[in-house]
């Protein structure tokens, strides 16, 4: 497993948002390459989800939280 904190993951995820196109729906996991997501400790992934949702609600009017998927992961849509 990678030794990385949720805050570091949040920074990476924010950078990856530049690659999301208008109208696309995504989950936080989509912002990371391949199987890398599964290498992060579960507690850091859960914390990242909370941090990312808070970031979107407070900083990004161009992203809308859009319910959860079948795996209980928050979905987002880029406006």
Image (spheres, helix red, strand yellow):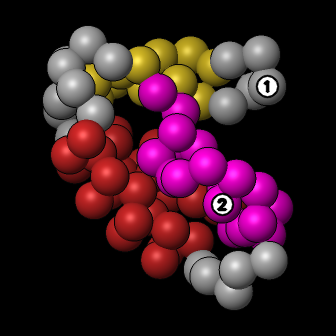
Horizontally, residue 27 falls left or right of residue 44, namely left
The image position of residue 51, as x and y in percent, is: 50, 57
Mark 2, residue position? 36
Rendered location of residue 24, percent (x, y): 33, 18
| Relative side of 70 to 51, left or right | right
Q: Residues within 10 Å of mark 2 (few under 14, many from 20)?
A: few
Q: Position of residue 40 (x, y in %)?
A: 72, 67
Which residue is pictured at 46% across the width and 46% down the height? 31
Visible residue check, residue 49: no
SS type, badge 1:
loop
Viewer-closest of 32 and 25: 32
Q: Where is residue 38, by image quadrant?
A: bottom right
Q: Is residue 2 above or below residue 79?
A: below
Magenta run includes residue 76? no
Q: Rounded to the nearest whole Å, what is the CA distance between mark 2 and mark 1?
A: 18 Å
Mark 2–mark 1 CB contact (< 8 Å): no
Q: Which residues are magenta?
A: 26-44
Residue at x 53%, y 24% (from the top left corner): 75
Query: In the image, residue 57 lies at what x, y percent?
Result: 33, 40
Question: Could you say which is closer to the camera, residue 40 or residue 51?
Answer: 40
Nearer mark to the viewer, of 2 and 1? 2
Q: Secondary structure at mark 2?
A: helix
Given the current orientation, which residue lies at the most extreme front position? 34
Question: According to the image, label 1 marks what residue?
Answer: 71
Judged left or right of residue 77, residue 33 is right
Residue 60 visible: yes
Q: Which residue is at 22% across, 26% downward?
A: 21
Question: What is the number of callouts on the image?
Answer: 2
Q: Earlier in the sequence, mark 2 or mark 1?
A: 2
Quarter location, residue 2:
bottom right
């Amino acid at each position: 497993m990678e030794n990385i904190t949720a805050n570091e993951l949040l920074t990476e995820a924010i950078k990856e948002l530049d690659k999301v196109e208008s109208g696309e729906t995504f989950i936080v996991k989509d912002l990371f390459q391949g199987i890398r997501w599964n290498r992060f400790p579960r507690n850091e992934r859960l914390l990242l989800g909370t941090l990312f949702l808070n970031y979107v609600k407070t900083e990004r009017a161009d992203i809308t939280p859009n319910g959860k998927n079948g795996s209980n992961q928050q979905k987002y849509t880029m406006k």
